[in-house]
Image (cartoon, grey):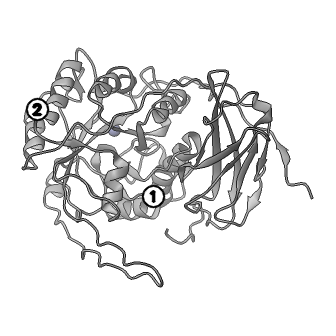
């Protein structure tokens, strides 16, 4: 039985078929409401060192370190409201972050620290930008690059070009891919940007219950970002920072390791994962920024890792022989991922990259003689519906192609009876 079958692969370009009226650009004021302030922070037991059956003792987690998380929205010369900030004020804030001794860290390092797998500096700062406005790409990104600061984009998927809520200031999937390729972290801000506390709303009529709607907003946006971008989405920002017990439990059930509100605070190793506060910066209230910087004392820190520049160009996909083949159902949580790249032309050595939805980038071997690429799953698959995205340089252009298969060993997330991960 020949294992290689021809799979027809869809083109990478996502077409924005319809233009709908744009969302109002302003968001409601962040929720510095009394309900958040009064919420008691319950500190879980610190994890104990574990003994592996026949391995070394696992190092105890480094529970030291602390972080503040800054939340921005729009960047414009004449801010339309408090959630807009001028480019010069933004640059001034980045300077202040540096001068105050903060290290700007990546979301993945923050999450690794929270899992007990890594340490972070005592004065860490995360920069996040909500919604996916064009100005985050055109204005904020170049300024952040000057500082070499990593940042996270919290995207609500219906606002991406082609989506039901997209507008003139929306980013496209192609632009998000470019950001991804240059090291920008992309996480979820739900599908429709409705308050998750609202038990009735214009999008909820399509769902059997409030819970089902919440699952779609939280798990659905994660799945779409993962399959369209070939990334692992592990963090969510609640729209307007609003949540309740059910929202928090469905967010954790959906596989998020961190869920962010907009109640600014110092985050420690023990801060509850389902309600991590961020400082929502408002241009009319410079005090919020000053308070944020004053939140963690001490000194030291550096400018943070550099965002690597890369020249990226997407080309249309073509037909390719793959394992698993397009649409195949596999049982293995770590199946071999193979592709015959002969159809792509002269692939430049060392340029083949593979990404898997729910996992992220994986190591890949490419044999120039046979033109076969093989990706190695170090971590098991986490999603039932898997998209593999393969990129390579051909004639100095970056080409991208993708295929999908199903992993039967992962429970169907849309099934109500699926066990929580
Ligand atoms: Zn938002």
Label 1 element class: helix
Snapshot quadrant of residue 83: top left
Work out which residue is located at the far front of the displayed protein and give it: 369
Residue 350: give x, y in percent of width and height: 61, 36
Return the residue at label 2.
285
In the displayed structure, does residue 143 sit left or right of residue 323? Answer: left
Work out which residue is located at the far bottom of the displayed protein and give it: 53
Residue 150: give x, y in percent of width and height: 33, 37
Snapshot quadrant of residue 414: bottom right
Q: Residue at x 35, y 61 (%)?
A: 248
Q: Earlier in the sequence, mark 2 or mark 1?
A: 1
Label 1 crowd (10 A; few <14 / some 14-19 / many >=20): some
Label 2 element class: loop
Task: Assess whether mark 1 and mark 2 are in contact (beta carbons under 8 angstroms).
Answer: no
How many numbered callouts? 2
- Is 358 located above or below residue 389 in the figure? below
Q: Residue at x 52, y 25 (%)?
A: 20
Return the residue at label 1.
210
Q: Residue at x 36, y 58 (%)?
A: 112
């Amino acid at each position: 039985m020949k294992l290689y079958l021809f799979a027809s692969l869809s083109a990478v370009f996502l077409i924005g078929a319809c233009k709908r009226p744009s969302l109002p650009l302003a968001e409601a004021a962040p929720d510095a409401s009394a309900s958040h302030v009064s919420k008691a922070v319950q500190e879980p037991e610190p994890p104990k060192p574990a003994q592996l059956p026949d391995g070394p003792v696992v190092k105890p987690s480094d529970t030291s370190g602390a972080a503040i998380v800054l939340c921005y929205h729009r960047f414009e010369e004449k801010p339309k409201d408090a959630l807009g900030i001028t480019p010069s004020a933004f640059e001034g804030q980045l300077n202040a972050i540096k001068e105050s001794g903060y290290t700007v860290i990546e979301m993945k390092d923050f999450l690794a620290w929270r899992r007990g797998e890594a340490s972070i500096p005592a004065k860490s700062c995360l920069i996040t930008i909500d919604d996916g406005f064009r100005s985050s790409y055109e204005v904020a990104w170049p300024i952040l690059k000057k500082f070499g600061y990593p940042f996270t984009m919290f995207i609500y998927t219906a606002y991406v070009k082609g989506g039901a809520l997209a507008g003139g200031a929306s980013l496209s999937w192609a632009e998000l891919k470019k950001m991804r390729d240059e090291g920008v972290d992309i996480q979820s801000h739900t599908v429709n940007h409705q308050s998750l506390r609202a038990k009735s709303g214009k999008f909820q009529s399509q769902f059997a219950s409030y819970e089902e709607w919440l699952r779609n907003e939280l798990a659905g946006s994660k799945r779409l970002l993962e399959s369209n971008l070939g990334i692992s989405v592990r963090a969510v920002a609640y729209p307007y920072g609003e949540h309740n017990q059910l929202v928090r439990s469905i967010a954790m059930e959906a596989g998020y390791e961190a869920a962010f509100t907009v109640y600014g605070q110092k985050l420690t190793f023990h801060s509850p994962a389902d309600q991590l506060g961020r400082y929502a910066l408002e241009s009319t209230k410079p005090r919020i920024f000053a308070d944020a910087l004053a939140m963690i004392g001490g000194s030291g820190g550096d400018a943070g890792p550099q965002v690597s520049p890369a020249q990226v160009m997407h080309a249309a996909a073509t037909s390719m022989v793959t394992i698993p083949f397009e649409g195949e159902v596999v049982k293995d949580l770590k199946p071999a991922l193979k592709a015959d790249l002969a159809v792509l032309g002269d692939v430049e050595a060392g340029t083949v990259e593979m990404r898997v939805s729910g996992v992220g980038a994986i190591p890949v071997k490419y044999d120039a003689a046979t033109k076969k690429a093989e990706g190695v799953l170090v971590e098991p698959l986490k999603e039932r519906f898997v998209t593999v995205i393969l990129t390579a340089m051909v004639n100095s252009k970056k080409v991208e192609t993708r295929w999908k298969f199903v992993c039967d060993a992962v429970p169907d997330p849309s099934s109500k009876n699926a066990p929580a991960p």
